[in-house]
Image (spheres, rainbow, N blue to C red):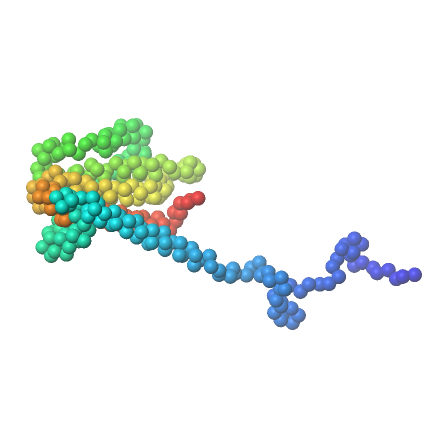
Amino acid sequence: MAASTAAPAGTTTSDAVAAPSTTRTPTGTGAGGASVTDPGGIAPSGAPPTPGRGGSSRGRAGLVSLVVLPAAVFAVFVGIWYWVSDGVLNEQQRFMLPPPHEVVRIGFLDWTNFTSMMSALKLTCEVTFAGLAISMVLGVAVAIAMSQARWIEHSLYPWAVVVQTVPILALTPVLRFFFGFALTSRIIVCIIISFFPIVSNTLFGLQSVDRSMHELFSLHHTNRWTRLWKLQLPAALPSMFNGFRNAAGLSVIGAIVGEFYFKQGDPGLGTNLSVFTSRLEGERLWATTLTASLLGVAVFVFFGWLARRVVGRWYQPDRG
């Protein structure tokens, strides 16, 4: 009679049959703690991933999207500029669009013209930042007031839209009559143009707080100002800075428009645009235009950087 093998206590016969005949040493250790290499090449689940080529390829893709593509578009733009200036326009028409190298030579490399442009740029910056600062204070204050009561929103928001849509040309005689040709009139034009984006974006952020957060604050019986200071304003910061960034670019336009219409006093970039247009000085006209555009880009980029510094550490939008 064959001797039967007894199964260990607590196991059934089927379990004993199904049990493997050999015991496998865990991956990574062998007898006596010696390192054992898994023949299957599968790393332990807790092992850090091996760096591959994904990071470098993403870095190259980011470099292409941030540097190479804008540079390519700029090269195409300059090429079209040269083609229109040298191939489409004749000698009598070329003053309207002189070639880029002439714009750089006369507008930027000539010391007299350059110092005159920098003086005008300084005045335009003063008007821009003064108007933008006032717009930020007034716009945030009006948006907060509208977010606290529906009747205030219904009373003020339509007039904020009206201020945005009124033609500036229609207001210049009134501003000239009350404020003259000083910097005040230019700053008011800058405020009018840059006011609405701050109001609309800040109000949107204040009203977009999650309802469950409001319910949590109501559960703790917080008052209106605590709710505003600790819930609504922090949640509205991304939208608020988006409004600041849009208004920053518009404030440069407002300063240029104000200087264009109120020509008396110290000249700014807008005043020089009007003067160079009347004198048919195309090189200085386009150099001033490029300087004004670079100012708008610089202010826009600054507020984008400031927004990332303030809210970028905790606010990560879903890019899908």
Residue 143 found in image quarter: top left
**Quick check: can you spot residue 32?**
yes
Placement of 174 over or under 15, stated as above or below: above
Picture coordinates of residue 137, whole percent (x, y) = 23, 41
Say whether residue 245 is left or right of residue 28.
left
Q: In the rendered view of the protein, which quadrant contains the N terminus?
A: bottom right
| x and y, in percent, of residue 263 in the image | 9, 41
Q: Position of residue 227 (x, y in %)?
A: 36, 39
Residue 24, position as x, y percentages in the image: 68, 63
Q: Is residue 269 visible?
A: no
Q: Residue at x 21, y 46 (%)?
A: 87
Residue 177 located left or right of residue 208: left
Outermost residue on the right side: it is 1
Q: Which residue does the image show at 17% across and 34% down from the upper left? A: 168
Give the total of numbered labels: 0
> Which residue is drawn at the image coordinates 29% and 41% (left, top)?
243
> In the rendered image, which quarter contains the C terminus?
top left
> In terms of depth relative to the viewer, which is nearer, 68 or 295?
68
Q: Quadrant of residue 241?
A: top left
Residue drawn 29% across the image and 30% down it: 153
Q: Is residue 146 above or below residue 118?
A: above
Which of 62/81 is in front? 81
